């Protein structure tokens, strides 16, 4: 007994010692900054210095119409982007799951938007969206849909939609790959049994595939929502949040306040709102994961 | 059961074609633009056809942005440093998670997952102030230090699953035969985990290469240290944007990660999806 206890604690010490470097690094570079952000949100910190000002940043922020608009916009932007990623990703996964020639090549060809640095991929989109010389405006003009050059990123509504499409382009490959992996994990005998019972392809998809991959669909919706919420580079590069704020999401606003104007305090208050929302998402996600794990271990 | 009639085949291939067009159009159009002369690009409405395609832009871009080579080097250098540092921090931690039982093990693993969900943007303010106090703004370190932090969590999860695949019996057998911990590490764990280390290292490299933009625009203003994702925007600074050269440079800038990924996509995707799909 004593021996066992001793080896148990020795093991614990070794484990902690092995983890310590990574843990300390994360505490210094992630955990401390998170706490410091909370503290800064109660100050008027700037490059000049800082004073404690209580809740002023928050009061100003929540009473500003602009900020409330930004929050609403963020969720609308997110809703469309995430839904499109999931729908297109699911359709893509079904197509690439079909047992046809060339599918292994297509499965590799979906991935580039996911792997390539976003900032570089967005250069391509800047060119595509170019109002005079870009291919999208070109097709529009030649088919008569547009009666002249049209800068997709220059008008409020079209910029909003254009940034969503670029975000969907970046996020869809990953969703597709995960859905595909899940579809391949569905036991084959389920399909064979259904086939013998005369179920159509359609039935097999809705009665077998879809229910079987539901856990992955739910997990991916949450993960995708979190990443979309965090999406910074795409909007920053395409529009910097404009024109006239029409693509300014919470993350963009936080960045602009903090590092565009060096109003650290105001920026920090926005960062705290972002943090709280992210914590809610993360809590949902982890609770869900724990539930799915439990269910699997019960089966 | 997996036979398709010709009509279904055409339908599915058409669907794949539409889907792939959405995914690949930007790349195809970037490549096409990089081959066309500038005066063909500056025609409105868009001209679909150019008869004098050439790789001229790939030569000229180095003159237009003289530091281009330096930016590419910086990107490689930064991503390599981040990848190596990440491995150094992650190897012992992942080994501990794979082999030992200890209090708060599961909780800390979940915390790591949660960290993945925070974007860098939330912690930029304190990091900016910290780097400023340490005098590290406008240096390589200002981009390396935060870069490592955001790769550690996923790298631990990935590497843990590789370590778990090494049968523990092998280690125990060696231990019974009187091998020391160091010997076990050198002769059993190191060789068996090399493939896993390579995959995680490359994952970290690709991740580091991809995340350079945010840290670079925030913490670095010096051209000498600029990585390619920000350096490319110098092409926009000219009176008329030299789109063909910018597209050429963009393709050259994304090529290394694309090649690495294509060679190793099977392993990386397997590792990443395993967690979410099977749990």
Image (cartoon, coloured by chain):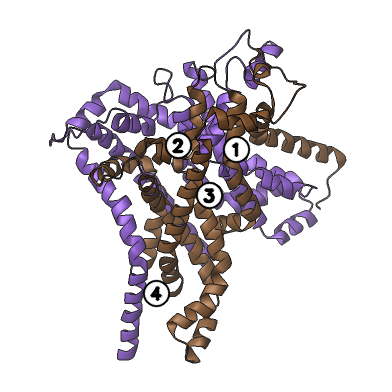
Chain colours: A purple, B brown
Neighbor class of circle 3 (other Cα within 10 Å; few <14, some 14-19, many 20+) is many
Q: Do discs 3 and 2 belong to a common subunit?
A: no
B183 versus B239 height, above or below = below
Circle on res. A87: 1
Chain under numbered label 4? B
Residue B59 can be seen, yes or no: yes
- Residues at marks 2 and 1, common chain? yes
Element at label 1: helix
Q: Name the residue under label 4.
A: B101
Of label 3 and label 4, which has the lower sequence position? 4
Q: Residue under circle 2?
A: A231
For disc 1, the chain is A
- Whether marks 3 and 4 lie on the same chain: yes
SS for callout 4: loop
C-alpha distance separating marks 4 and 2:
37 Å
Dot 2 falls on a residue whose secondary structure is loop
Task: Please state which of the two labelled residues, at mark 4 or mark 1, is closer to the viewer.
Answer: 4
Location of residue A80 with respect to A141 vertically, above or below: below
Q: Mark 3 lies on which chain?
A: B
Mark 2 residue crowding within 10 angstroms, few (<14) / some (14–19) / many (20+) = some
Residue mark closest to the camera, 3 vs 2:
3
Vertical side of B34 occupied by A222: above or below: below
The residue closer to the viewer here, B9 or A169, is A169
| Alpha carbon distance from label 3 to label 4 | 32 Å
Q: Give the left or right position of residue A175, taking residue B81 as reference.
A: right
């Amino acid at each position: 007994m004593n021996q066992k206890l001793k080896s148990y604690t020795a093991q614990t010490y070794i484990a902690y010692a092995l983890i310590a470097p990574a843990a300390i690094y994360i505490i210094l570079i992630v955990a401390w900054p998170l706490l410091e952000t909370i503290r800064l949100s109660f100050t008027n910190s700037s490059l000049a210095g800082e004073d404690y000002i209580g809740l002023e940043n928050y009061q100003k922020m929540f009473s500003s119409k602009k900020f409330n608009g930004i929050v609403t916009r963020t969720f609308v932007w997110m809703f469309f982007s995430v839904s499109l990623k999931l729908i297109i990703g699911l359709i893509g996964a079904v197509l690439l799951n079909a047992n046809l020639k060339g599918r292994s090549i297509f499965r590799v060809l979906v991935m580039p938007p996911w792997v390539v640095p976003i900032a570089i991929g967005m250069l391509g989109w800047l060119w595509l969206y170019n109002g005079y010389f870009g291919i999208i405006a070109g097709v529009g003009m030649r088919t008569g849909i547009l009666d002249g050059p049209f800068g997709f990123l220059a008008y409020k509504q079209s910029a909003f939609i254009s940034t969503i499409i670029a975000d969907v382009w970046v996020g869809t490959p990953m969703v597709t790959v995960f859905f595909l992996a899940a579809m391949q994990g569905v036991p084959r005998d389920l399909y064979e049994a259904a086939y013998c019972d005369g179920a159509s392809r359609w039935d097999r998809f809705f009665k077998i595939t879809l229910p079987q991959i539901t856990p992955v669909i739910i997990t991916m919706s949450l993960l995708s929502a979190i990443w979309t919420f965090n999406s910074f580079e795409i909007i920053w590069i395409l529009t910097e949040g404009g024109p006239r704020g029409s693509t300014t999401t919470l993350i963009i606003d936080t960045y602009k306040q903090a590092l565009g104007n060096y109003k650290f305090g105001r920026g920090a208050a926005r960062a705290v709102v972002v943090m709280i929302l992210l914590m809610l998402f993360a809590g949902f996600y982890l609770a869900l994961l724990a539930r799915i794990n439990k269910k699997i271990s019960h089966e | 059961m997996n036979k398709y009639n010709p009509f279904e085949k055409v339908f599915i291939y058409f669907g794949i074609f539409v889907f792939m067009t959405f995914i690949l159009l930007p790349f195809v159009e970037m490549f096409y633009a990089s081959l066309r002369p500038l005066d063909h690009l500056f025609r409105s409405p868009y001209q679909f056809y150019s008869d004098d395609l050439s790789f001229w832009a790939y030569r000229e871009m180095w003159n237009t942005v003289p530091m281009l080579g330096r930016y590419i080097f910086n990107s490689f250098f930064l991503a390599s440093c981040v990848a190596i540092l990440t491995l150094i921090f992650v190897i012992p931690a992942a080994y501990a998670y794979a082999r030992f039982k200890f209090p708060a093990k599961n909780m800390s693993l979940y915390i790591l997952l949660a960290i993945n969900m925070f974007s860098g943007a939330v912690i930029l303010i304190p990091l900016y102030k910290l780097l400023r106090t340490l005098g590290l703004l406008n240096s390589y370190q200002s981009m390396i230090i935060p870069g490592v932090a955001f790769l550690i969590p996923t790298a631990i999860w990935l590497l843990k699953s590789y370590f778990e695949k090494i049968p523990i019996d092998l280690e125990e057998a060696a231990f019974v035969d009187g091998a020391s911990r160091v010997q076990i590490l050198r002769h059993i764990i190191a060789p068996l985990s090399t493939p896993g280390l390579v995959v995680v290292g490359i994952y970290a490299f690709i991740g580091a290469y991809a995340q350079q933009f945010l840290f670079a625009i925030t913490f670095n203003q010096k051209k000498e240290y600029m990585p390619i994702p920000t350096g490319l925007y110098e092409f926009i600074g000219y009176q008329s944007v030299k789109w063909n050269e910018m597209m050429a440079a963009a393709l050259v800038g994304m090529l290394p990660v694309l090649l690495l990924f294509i060679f190793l996509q099977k392993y990386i995707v397997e590792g990443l999806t395993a967690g979410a799909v099977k749990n």
